[in-house]
Amino acid sequence: QVFTFNTVEIKVQPSVKVKNGAPMSIVCHADISKSTDFQLKHNFTIFKDGKLVFMTVSDKGDAQYEISMARSSDTGDYECTVEAGGKTKSSNSLHVWVTGMTKPILTAEKKEVLEGEVVKLRCELPEEVPPLHFFFRKIKMNSTPKEKLVFEPYRNFSVVEFSVEEGDNILQFDCFGRRSVKLEFESSEHSNKTLVTVREPFIKPTLNVKPSSNITEGDRIQFECSTVVARMRDIEIILQKNKTILNSVRDEKVLKYSVVATLEDSGEYLCKVEQGRASKTTKLNVVVSELFPKPILAASMSKLDENKELTLTCSISGFRKANFSILRKNSNGDIWLKNSTNLTMRVNVNDTGSYICKAELKGIVKESKPVRINVYAPVSKPTLSVVGGLPEVVLGKPLQLICRSVMGTPPITFTFYKGNEVKKIVINDTYATFLDENIRQNDKRGYKCDARNNHSSGIKTSNILNITVIVPIKNASLGSIPYGEVEDGRETAFLCSVKEGSWPIHFRIFRKTDREVLLFEKSENADRVMWRKEAMNRQDTGTYYCIASNRANVDVKSRPITISVILAAWQKGVIAAFVLIPIAGAVTLTLWWFLCKKKKAKGPSMEMSSSALATNLTSEKLTRQHNDGDYYSGSGYIEDSENHMKSTDESKGPDLESAEVEYTEVEVSTLDPHRAPVQKGTETVYSEIRKANN
């Protein structure tokens, strides 16, 4: 008994679109191939939107889910699964749309309401499945229906409230529903219409005014607003003009209000009666005739110098019976000046301000338009200076100038000049600034500024301000003589110079070894400075550089140079002498000892050899000393001594050892290896002169 599922199919009868209320069948068919004809039980399961809606077991390959009356809630995606002999297979998903929605049911909480109350409505779609949209409508005679929309994601009904307004008497309400199916909207038919009757809680108010016509300024006007109410509780009457509340009463049927009429009292008045949400209004237009026009204040001048005379005149065209007064406006209250139509005074700057005049008749006071009076003090001579201090600027940087006038009534007009060219005009109170960003190195034009106001004295001009343009340092360099290697003890000259820069320039020379050491600093009105180091030594070996700066406050550093201090020639000679002289002395002593020993053995012949050897040694010594740079002026004396020693030795022979020794001081001239002139000094040279006993 071998079988296999070929397909599992699902279909709807009569079609995938079914009208609401019509019968509908969901049919599931399993196509199975068998090896032999045998009975096979099939477990059919039908799902709608993933939820189980039908199950059955059958020997046949078909199962049918019957719906006698299709509703919109039956709309969805259907799928069939068949299980047989341990094998399972599912169909594809099939979307079924039940078109048309059930008719909604609308109910009203009250059938009769008062103006200002609310009507609470409930609309229900009993056989529909959320989410749903509910539309409520309020229908009045001869007016467009008012509509409210409510979205209900989780219920199939909705509740809403409509307010009952003034003028509502017989109201009708209905509702309908809407749902979304596969991105398409479907609406239900409208519900039954529900009728609601409206009663008035009070009648429309009545507004009266006395006198009703020919109202003139100075007359007393009386307003009366009244109504008839069903119940007095929470009743309120309000009188308004241009949205301003003039008077109000509570829990009363009548409101009264009176006022002395002025021209400003003309206009529309509104009486409003309120109780809860109910409100009724009545409007009345009132016209007040003018008793006399507003006064006019005239000034002899509106702008004048201090200590000048000002005349103010108050008048009403064709009317002179009023009482006049002239006042000055003030934030803390107007300042009375005089009860008259005319005022003459000598002004100062403190009299600047706004002036008015008032006219009074029959209790009606009218005020003129304000007149502005400006009194000017002359400007003082302005001062022009640089913001921040000194009259100088670094080339490439902007220059900010300030022009200030200590005295003078604002506004003051300041004019800046560079040479004779106008650069900027500023109107301010006491000062103005100017930023010059076009600074040139050789610009010789001076700056000045003018100040003026509305005083008749005219323009005042500052002194000319000349600006020093500071050129920053460029390209500092350091050199030395000699350069590179310097002998120990020798003088070295360092030259620090710059290519460009305003004087004075501050020069600093540094040596850098393991740390930086300031060796020299000086300010010069020149582009270079020289520093002499008299005697260099080995500790002066290192890297040298210089830094130059001026009032531009920018340090410019030179490239470094390296100085090496080496031994002087005479120092090399001294070292050589210290090494060679002990060696030569040792050799001489050895030879002398050898010759003396040989002389004792051979007698006169030995003396001859010794004399010749001594002569050769003396000559060799003098030659070596000359080569070392020393010159002895007493060399002839030394030769005579040797000859004397020779003659004595020949005559005395063995008595040489017993000879006495004398010491003589001679003057020796020494050559300086580094300088051409001969330096003279006194040295002691000991010459041994051996005497015979006689």
Image (cartoon, rainbow, N blue to C red):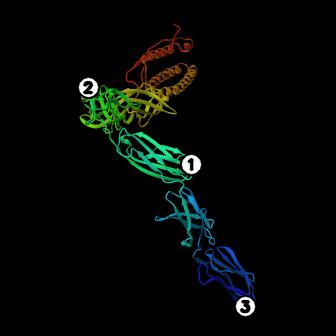
Does 166 appear above or below 269? below
Q: Position of residue 318 (x, y in %)?
A: 25, 36
Number of marks in the image? 3
Q: Quadrant of the N terminus?
A: bottom right
Residue 308 disc label? 2
Q: Give the image quarter of residue 667.
A: top left
Earlier in the chain: of badge 3 and badge 2, it is 3
Mark 3 surroundings within 10 Å by alpha-carbon count, few (fewer than 14), some (14 through 19), many (20 or more): few
Amino acid bearing label 1: Asp
- Circle 3 sits on which residue? 35
Looking at the picture, which amino acid does disc 2 mark? Lys
Tell me residue 345's x, y (percent).
28, 25
Give the structural element (helix, strand or loop) at label 2: loop
Q: CA distance from mark 3 to mark 2?
A: 132 Å
User: Left or right of 12: which side holds 88?
Assistant: right
How far apart are the two marked residues, 1 and 2, measured between alpha carbons?
67 Å
Q: First in sequence: mark 1 or mark 3?
A: 3
Say the numbered circle drawn on residue 234: 1
Q: Are marks 1 and 3 in contact (CB under 8 Å)?
A: no
Q: Badge 1: how crowded within 10 Å, few (<14), some, or many (20+)? A: few
Residue occupying the point 55% across, 53% down: 230
For the residues labelled 1 and 2, say whether their Cβ atoms are less than 8 Å apart: no
Of the residues shown, which amino acid type is indicated by label 3?
A: Ser
Residue 134 position in % (x across, y down): 57, 66
The nearer-to-camera label among 3 and 2 is 2
- Mark closer to the observer (1, 2): 1
Q: Quadrant of residue 375?
A: top left
